[in-house]
Image (tube, grey):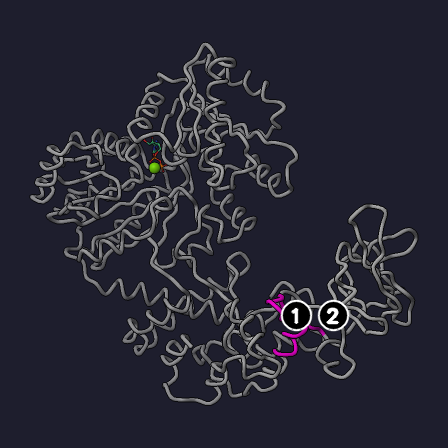
Amino acid sequence: MTSKRLDSVSHPPGTNESEGFLATPLQFLKGVGPRRAADFERVGLITIEDLLYRFPLRYEDRSRLQPIGTLKPGRPASVSGRILSCGVRFTRRRGFQIFEAVIDDGSGPLRVVWLNQPYLSDVFMRGQRVVLYGSVEMYGSAVQLTNPQYEILDEEEGETVHTGRIVPVYEKTGAVTPRVQRNIVFDALERLPPSLPEPLPDDIPARLQLPSRYAALLATHFPPQGTSIDALNQFGTTAQRRLIFEEAFLFQTGIVARRRFAASEPKASPIRVDDRIRESARRVLPFRLTGGQKQALKDIVEDLQRPHPMNRLLQGDVGAGKTIVALVAALVAMENGQQVAFMAPTEILAEQHFLNISRLLQGSRFRVALLTGSTTSTARREQLAEIEAGTIHLVVGTHALVQGDVRFQALGLVVIDEQHRFGVLQRATLRAKGLHPDVLVMTATPIPRTLALTVYGDLDVSAIRDLPPGRFPVKTFVKPESRRDEVYAFVRGELEAGRQAYVIYPLVEESAKLDLKAATGMADHLAAEVFPAYHVGLLHGRLKPDGKDRVMKAFAAGELNLLVSTTVVEVGMDVPNASVMIVEHAERFGLSQLHQLRGRVGRDRHQSYCFLLYQSPLADEARERLRAMTETTDGFEIAEYDLRLRGPGDFFGTRQAGLPTFRMVDLVRDRELLEIARREAVRWFDRSPAASAQVGELLQSWENRFKLIEVG
Ligand code: ADP
Ligand code: MG
């Protein structure tokens, strides 16, 4: 059991019988043979601990089963009764079968139907006692239950386990039905030693008013009479919160350990800031920083002055002005004799940054280079020599910058732009090369608080929440495809006024070819029939890099008026003159992605517009998403919303490495407990010297337990 190591930090190690109990394989429990054990194992349940640290799906109050005579349509109900009759009923519709049962609980009979589940004739028999949970509907003038979940009660055993109380309902795992699992959990809890060791530091349960581990496990699986069923189903009882907190705390201990571990590596030379450097920074600034930019810069410069490497995430919506903040930080590093690597996810973005930065640093003594795949080999050789000699101070490039043959004379700061596109291994690469520079990661994908506390938990976070002055929020409209002519008419107006437009096409992996055809067809159609007076370009991921480059440059230069593109345009493309965007099949995009796309317009003083075209019929969730887009342009709000709609696994669009595997914590639900856990973990470290001494060991078991690899 991997958590043992964590436990042993606050409790002297030693074989402890009651601790050993939790590590017992499930096979030793009553009712678990090899087959069920295999079913459990398939979902990762191997020991008694695994079993008990898995919440039920939901709870049913069977202490107050509703008498059949009092059922009201429109809300779910639990009822219990004896089967009077049951059987398959054939209907006129071919292939459509209904399994029907009538049950009676003494207060009246109730019709129950299951649609297209004829195998139920092998499950139910007249005379059985059953518990049913499902939605009550009207059928003619009587109520009926449709497709309820069911359990057949054994006359002999377990009446106190399955009825007459609040019962847990577990997820079915293979052949292990919810009812079977309830028996097994009940058995495990009966044998659970009350002296179960406490993995939380001694003072925490009392101070946070949380029950002991033993009491929490009991009350989580078999809640005492009178517990609020709503609180249980929201996983908000003190018993449940205690178990969630326990996991959150162990997790945060690891995060804090990792941070302390990183902080124990001294960096080559901390940075000093004096008036001369302040003045030099002021000279490159082309405008006044916003409040958010100032605060972020202050955070960063404070980090730079510390003796240990910075690991900071700078969040800020598209257009919030992250680049200039990073550049001032770079300037401070360079004034201290250090070199800076500035990495972008694509060559185009690297070029943009290079042009920008070169312009801003024109009057300074610092030399900037661009190093990408298209740098010629002679130029590259010269640049590499200068970087190694230290006569080039700032290098802009793609992530190959820290991987390949590039050797710095004194690399002090690494800036990583648009991190979520980047993969996760740069910092590991740096460390492997024996480098401990300050690292600033920038992202325009605002990260919800719970994810900042977990996935990015070992980074410090600064957020720019305001926008530079004079920006108008993009006006956003949701329209069915059938009204595309109106939209085109509007776009024509913008093009006539000299603006440019994007038309975005989704590209879904599985059907990439089809979509590509659709995007190509759309570009041809727009060029030939809809906007014949204008130049239309096409951009997609299958173009060769230089082809892609040519199209983007032509659009940036205004030679193309309208750009049809797949989502490759999403990251970082900066064409301030573009004022309108049409997103085709907007219903297929995630919220954060739509937000990113929309960020390509509204980058100048023109009012900008975004049309989200959808294909009917629109699913409810898609409708919600599109509505959210019209209601706010605040990326942080959108991110929180997106997390709630899609869950953490899908939040980043692709599976994000580094998402911890939690058993009890829910990243949407448990924000508050995660915050408290972080605070308590820091506090515990600060007060226990033993913990600090064991940081390395702690980390290892921790990374195994939460199946983590490093992010950033
Ligand atoms: P992002 O955060 O998306 O990387 P950028 O750094 O590209 O944003 O900035 C977007 C635009 O806003 C750039 O053209 C930049 O010069 C401009 N900008 C940034 N900060 C300010 C400011 N404080 N006042 C005016 N314009 C600013
Ligand atoms: Mg940027």
Residue drawn where x is 53% and y is 56% of the image: 668
The reply to whether dot 2 and dot 1 touch (C-beta < 8 Å) is yes
For the residue pair 438 and 31, the one nearer the viewer reads as 31
Q: Secondary structure at mark 1?
A: helix
For the residue pair 143 and 290, the one nearer the viewer reads as 143
Label of residue 151 in the image: 2
Work out whether residue 678 can be spotted: yes
Amino acid type for the residue under numbered disc 2: Glu
Mark 1 CB lies closer than 8 A to ligand 1: no
Residue drawn where x is 40% and y is 28% of the image: 603
Label of residue 126 in the image: none
Q: Earlier in the sequence, mark 2 or mark 1?
A: 2
- Residue position for label 1: 178
Q: In screen coordinates, is 406 left or right of 161?
A: left
- Say few, some or many: other residues with alpha carbon within 10 Å of mark 1 (under 14 / 14 to 19 / 20 or more): some
Residue 214 is situated, as x and y percent measured from the top left of the image, at 55, 81
Relative to 293, is 458 above or below? below
Instruction: Looking at this view, name the residue that lies furthest to the front.
Output: 94
Residue 193 is situated, as x and y percent measured from the top left of the image, at 54, 87
